[in-house]
Structure formats: structure tokens, C-alpha cells
Amino acid sequence: MRDWATTVENTHYVIGSVVGPHPFPSMVREFHAVISREARRQFAEQVGGLPDAVVACAGGGSNTMGTFEAFLDDENVDLYAVEAGGSGLGVDDDAGVAPNSASLSTGTEGVLHGARTKVLQDPDGQIVESHSVSAGLDYAGVGPQLAHLVDEERVHAVNVDDDAALEGFHRLSNTEGVIPALETAHAFGYLEEYHEELGERVVINVSGRGDKDLETAIEETPNHDVPNAPDMDVFEQTGGM
């Protein structure tokens, strides 16, 4: 993005999230909206009616907007954007870092990569370094439409920490045989902790495969409080299966 800003005469950068300047937030949301359109139709066919809640992990927000788009006008469906709470909320202004990537929950209005949205920044407006156990959620901003929907109280901005994300990672792997991406694991971590608040009919988007995150899970799990984790020596020897 920085290179593009200085070479606009002869280059263009196409970004794959709902961040950055127009038209990328609109384009990527529309491309990803097939997720929610199919989910809404399949839920009506297989379960009947609409879900009580739809839950999706949120970094830049492409997965979230794709999962929410078809449900935005369904006011009885609660929408939850689950951010990476990392190792704690807030920003260390002196160090210029945030131990989280929860822009919707803890960010303030600012401009990042050509979009006015919610960003993690210090009092001088300088973007601070973010953190998440999931590289895919480790971004100091968020899509402007998602920030607007949170301001309008249509979307609930929530977050879980690294411990809960790893708990969700192992829970889904153990019970369903589906290894989720660590991004998605945040959504399952939230389900684990707050399922009673979500209602009985919940849709969660499994946004990616977790085989890319096995090395991180093996490395990080012993450093966190994850009661349902397998024996990590055996886990590593068997390649996570």
C-alpha cells in the first residue's frame, strides 16, 4: 500500500480484504457474500427459519462481511464479529504496541491505508503494532463498513484472548475432526465461553483450513492455558492428527 501511494502513475495494488480505499471494501464484500447467501438459504432449508445468531472472526473484516451480508436486514438475527483480544486489551502508548488486534473493540476513529475507520493508534494518531496468535487477524485496522455497522449497533464487536482461541482450535479438532484456521478458532472460542447468550440456533463460518496453523498451534499451546489440549508431544509426532 505504501509503494502504491508513491507510484500511482504506473502501478496498482489489488487487496483481498474489505480494507483500503474504494472500491476494494465493496468489491471484496460482494465477492465474499456468496458465503452468507448460501448459508442463509441452506439454514432455511435444513433447519427452518433463520438462526438466532451469526458469528464470524474479524481481522480486516472480509470473512465477517461475507458472513453477515445476507443477514444484515434480518433484525432478529444477532451478528457477532469476534476479534483477537490477544494477551490483553488496550494500547501501551509508550511502547507503541497493542497486545491485541481488536480494532472494533478498542480502536478509535482514524485513517489507515486510505480508509476512514477504527484503528489501533497512539494519542498522536500513529498506528501501533498489533498482536494475535493468528497472523490472519493481526491487523491494526478494520473494514470501514464493519466499523460503521458496529457504530450503528447492528453488529456486536466482541473479542477473545489467545487462550480461548487455542481452546476453540483444539475443541473443534477433537470433537468434529475439523482443524480450523486460528482465525476461525476465535469464533469457536467465543462460542465456547458465551454460548448461552447466543441462542440455540447459531451459524459460525469456518473461514479457513487449520493445516497452515499446525506449527503455530504446536508451538503456542504449551505457553497458554488450554485445558482441552492433547498431549503436545504426541500431537507433534503425529502431525496433529
Image (tube, grey):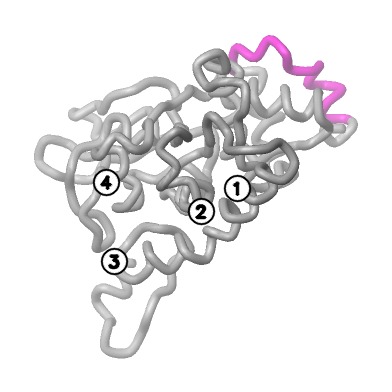
Residue 80 seen in this snapshot? no
Q: Circle 3: is it few (<14), some (14-19), or many (20+) Cα within 10 Å?
A: some
Seen from the viewer's position, the closer of residues 76 and 90 is 76
Q: Which of the two discs, 2 and 4, labels the residue nearer the N terminus? A: 2
Q: What amino acid does circle 4 point to?
A: His
Image-quadrant location for residue 179: top right
SS under mark 3: loop
- In the rendered image, residue 235 lying in the magenta stretch gets the answer yes
Cα distance between the residues tagged 3 and 4: 15 Å
What is the residue that sits farthest to the left in this orientation?
124
Q: Which residue lies under the disc numbered 1?
A: 40
Which of the two discs, 3 and 4, sits closer to the camera?
A: 4
In contact (CB < 8 Å): disc 3 and disc 4: no
Q: Which residue lies under the disc numbered 3?
A: 21
Which of the two discs, 3 and 1, sits closer to the camera?
A: 1
SS under mark 1: helix
Which of the two discs, 2 and 1, sits closer to the camera?
A: 1
Q: What amino acid does circle 1 point to?
A: Arg
Q: Which of the two discs, 2 and 3, labels the residue nearer the N terminus? A: 3
Q: Which residue lies under the disc numbered 2?
A: 66
Q: What amino acid does circle 3 point to?
A: Pro
Residues shaded magenta? 224-237
